[in-house]
Amino acid sequence: MHGTRIPLAKPDSRAITIRLARNPSDLMLVTAIRSAVYLAEQDCPFDEEFDGNDMVAAHFIGYIGNEPAGCLRVRFFGDFAKVERLAVRHQYRRSRLSFKLVQASIDFVKRKGFRKIYGQAQDRLVDFWAHFGAKPLGHNRKITFSDFSYTEMLLEIEPGPDAITLDSDPYVIIRPEGDWDRPGVLDASSGRAVTSPLRDLALADR
């Protein structure tokens, strides 16, 4: 085998994967995707699309193969989560990416223990959201913004059997968002002896 090159398996260029945004580079991907969809295609003004809520939300990024192709945002309120800003680049809209993004967000919200998901769907997309069990909220409140008419939608869910609660392992609660099943850096730090470094500083200041 010496000197023989083993061909590497090529990644499936059509495979769909979803992950959470975790750093500024990921937020740049989200910005690029939403700019292509909402600013370029729907002529949405910049300050209406980038509304000041991106830094207080969870963002999902969807890939087709290695290409970032879609995204979705989730924000959290007292007793409900709001799923919003679903965007898929036009060349990938024949894929199942939009469905995968929404399902990933629903699973995420269930894991966090919520029972209600609220959304504001463009009227033409009500049937898409109904696919997941969402129904018009019934308030009959007319919502229009950024030149579209919207319908309020509500999806009632049951928290997952592994939903995170106050009774959950405390190390699970402090792990990176969405990566709760894998020990994190703070789990590893628990193996060190307790030294209370600030106590030594307090003693030195006396």
Image (cartoon, rainbow, N blue to C red):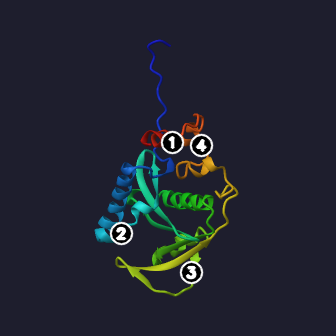
Q: Quadrant of residue 86?
A: bottom left
For residue 107, side relative to residue 56 (left or right): right
| Badge number at residue 51 | 2
Alpha carbons under labels 4 and 3: distance apart: 37 Å
Q: Earlier in the sequence, mark 2 or mark 4?
A: 2
- The three-letter amino acid code for the residue at tag 2 is Asp
In what element is the residue under mark 1?
Answer: helix
Q: Which residue is mark 1?
A: 199
Under circle 4, the secondary element is loop
Residue that label 3 marks: 137
Q: Amino acid at mark 3?
A: Leu
In-front residue for pair 160/113? 113
**Sooner in the amino-acid sequence: mark 1 or mark 4:** 4
**Identity, as a three-letter code, of the amino acid under mark 1:** Arg
Give the mark count: 4
Discs 2, 1 touching: Cβ within 8 Å? no
- Whole-angstrom CA distance, mark 2 to mark 1, is 44 Å
Decide: marks 4, 3 in contact (CB < 8 A)? Answer: no
Say which residue appears at 67% left-offset and 59% top-offset.
160
Q: Nearer the viewer, mark 1 or mark 4?
A: 1
Q: Is residue 12 visible?
A: no
Amino acid type, label 4: Arg
Q: Is residue 159 above or below residue 199?
A: below
Which residue is disc 4 drawn over? 182
Marks 1 and 3, the one that precedes in the sequence: 3
Q: Nearer the viewer, residue 182 or 10?
A: 182
Helix, strand or loop at label 3? It is loop
Q: Please name which of the two marks, 4 or 3, marks the residue nearer to the observer.
A: 4
Classify 10 Å Cα crowding around label 4: few (below 14), some (14-19), many (20 and above): few
Marks 2 & 3, CB-CB < 8 Å contact? no
Residue contact at pointers 2 and 4, CB within 8 angstroms: no
